[in-house]
């Protein structure tokens, strides 16, 4: 039996792969995703994996709770249509926006999330970091020994939106972000676990190092990815950030 990646590669064109240098405004990124998802759904564009950074901000997914925003004035807050709760985005974090046609990949959202987690785990393994999943907690975790016990910290968050079987939003992998910014929220609604990064684990990697590993692991799991020069960034005046997630 062929692997899933080989099955997709046998009849689907290569996924486009783009990397943006420097922070991308969050509202601009939302516009790009919205337009690209519509184009993929209508057969006017290829699937896209988009790697980027954002300026420091919080996003609130569809399950976000007011009480989990601990410091409303700390950073801009954006309420968005992805799944999940509160998370942080900022420089030093590799954002991976995943715009893929799930009809080509089994039309199973739960299985698709599992494959995304496996992709991150395979990427971390290239740096000898053991990533793990939890049945009751989305994302990818690492175990760390504290003074008295093993603790677990989240190193990558996953939050998706699926519209017409095309995904958007995706993965945030902590390379070397300012971890103190997580103090303004309860990340993903989980109060009894920490947040870590590759730098926090003692690995001084660059975003480029991680990008190379991400692409290699993606092609093993999903099929070929063709690097493109850039993603067109067209801001829209119709969207705005909010300071409170439930406005």
Image (cartoon, helix red, strand yellow):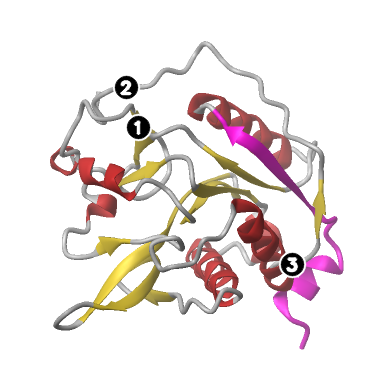
| Res. 63 visible in picture | no
Q: Crowding near pointer 1: few (<14 within 10 Å), some, many (20+)?
A: many
How far is mark 1 from mark 2, CA to CA? 7 Å
Front-most of residues 244 and 74: 74
Front-most of residues 124 and 17: 124
Please determine whether, in this image, residue 167 is positioned above or below residue 105.
Answer: above
Q: Which residue is mark 1?
A: 79
| Mark 2: secondary structure | loop
Q: Crowding near pointer 2: few (<14 within 10 Å), some, many (20+)?
A: few
How far is mark 3 from mark 2, CA to CA? 37 Å
Q: Earlier in the sequence, mark 3 or mark 2?
A: 3
Q: Which residues are magenta?
A: 1-24
C-beta proximity under 8 Å, tags 3 and 2 = no
Front-most of residues 120 and 94: 94
Q: Which residue is mark 2?
A: 242
What residue do we see at 68% from left, 71% from top? Answer: 221
Q: Which residue is mark 3?
A: 219
| Res. 122 visible in picture | yes
Residue 84 in the image, given as x and y percentages of width and height: 34, 50
Q: Crowding near pointer 3: few (<14 within 10 Å), some, many (20+)?
A: some
Quadrant of res 240: top left
| Mark 3: secondary structure | helix
How far is mark 3 from mark 1, CA to CA? 32 Å
Quarter of the rendering occupied by the C terminus: top left
Residue 19 in the image, given as x and y percentages of width and height: 69, 43
Q: Is residue 25 magenta?
A: no
Quarter of the rendering occupied by the N terminus: bottom right
What residue do we see at 80% from left, 74% from top? Answer: 6
Residue mark closest to the camera, 3 vs 1: 3
Instruction: Locate residue 205 relative to residue 88 in the image: left or right.
Output: right
Please determine whether, in this image, residue 89 is positioned above or below residue 205.
Answer: above
Q: Is residue 15 magenta?
A: yes
């Amino acid at each position: 039996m062929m692997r899933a990646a080989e099955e997709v590669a046998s009849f689907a064109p290569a996924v486009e792969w783009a990397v943006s240098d420097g922070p991308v405004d969050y509202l601009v990124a939302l516009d790009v995703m919205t337009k690209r998802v519509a184009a993929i759904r209508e057969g006017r564009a290829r699937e896209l994996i988009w790697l980027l950074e954002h300026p420091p901000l919080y996003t609130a997914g569809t399950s976000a709770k007011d009480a989990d925003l601990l410091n409303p004035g700390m950073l801009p807050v954006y309420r968005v249509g992805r799944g999940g709760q509160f998370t942080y985005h900022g420089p030093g974090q590799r954002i991976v926006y995943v715009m893929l046609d799930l009809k080509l990949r089994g039309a199973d959202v739960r299985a698709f999330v599992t494959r995304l987690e496996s992709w991150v785990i395979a990427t971390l393994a290239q740096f000898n970091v053991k990533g793990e999943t939890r049945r009751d907690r989305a994302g990818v975790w690492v175990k760390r020994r504290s003074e008295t016990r093993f603790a677990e910290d989240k190193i990558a968050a996953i939050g998706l939106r699926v519209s017409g079987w095309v995904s958007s939003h995706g993965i945030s992998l902590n390379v070397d972000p300012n971890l103190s910014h997580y103090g303004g929220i309860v990340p993903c609604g989980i109060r009894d676990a920490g947040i870590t990064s590759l730098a926090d684990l003692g690995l001084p990697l660059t975003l480029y190092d991680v990008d190379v590993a991400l692409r290699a692991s993606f092609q093993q799991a999903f099929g070929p990815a063709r690097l493109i020069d850039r993603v067109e960034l067209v801001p829209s005046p119709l969207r705005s950030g909010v300071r409170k997630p439930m406005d």
